[in-house]
Image (cartoon, helix red, strand yellow):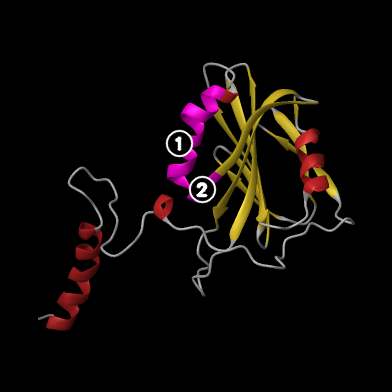
Amino acid sequence: MKSIFEKICRILPVLAVTASLSTAGALVPIAGSTPAFAEKAVQPEKNPPGDIPDSQVFIDYASPQGFAMKVPEGWARSDRADGASFVDKLDGVVVSVSKADAAPTAESAKANYVPDLEKTERAVKVSAVKPVTLPAGPAIRIVYTSNSEPNAVTNKQVRLENERYLFFKDGKLVTLELYAPKGADNVDQWQLMSNSFRWK
């Protein structure tokens, strides 16, 4: 006969999962937690880490999704179903692909893309949404700040600055996301990467 302790150990995980699901099966906030979009912006650090060194070497990344660009050599790469990410400490580059019926405009990005961004990321504050012309063609550039994910050990967050570029061709929307701690000096490196994007 199993002890009461063993029975409790078997029941607790089930209760935890049940408590975190609504009747429709969707995740709901656990009591006392704050939704990511409702967070308050954390204060940026005075001397933030995250500068990409001028000596950084960039290499070509060719995606099976039909585009290529330069990314920092030595950064940790993770392939995903919709693209790939390249991360080094608090800096990152993410490229993702989705389907779209038409090329985005500044107006459509403000009406549709930005609200979704504000819901899915932490304490987002958008400062610019505008069309730009890059070597790959027209794109939409979105500039914003956000909170990072909490550190798994310390639970600490940092304020990030982000740039997103939306590229469109033949029903395909590629989002290029660049992020680093707010105040880091990566202007030239980010420009190099965004200008290097090209369709294959």
Query: Magenta segment range?
Result: 107-125
Residue 94: which disc?
none
Question: Could you say which is closer to the camera, residue 42 or residue 8?
Answer: 42
Q: Which image quadrant is residue 191 in?
A: top right
Query: 61 or 154, which is in the foreground?
Result: 154
The residue furthest left is 1
Which secondary structure class fits the magenta region best? helix
Q: Is residue 140 magenta?
A: no
Which residue sits furthest right? Answer: 55
Q: Which residue is mark 2?
A: 124
| SS category of the residue bearing label 2 | strand
Residue 105: image location, x then y, percent: 59, 21
Task: List the residue tagged with mark 1.
Answer: 115
In this picture, is 185 found above or below 61? below
Instruction: Residue 99: tell me if it is visible.
Output: no
**What residue lies at 51% left-to-right and 58% top-to-bottom?**
41
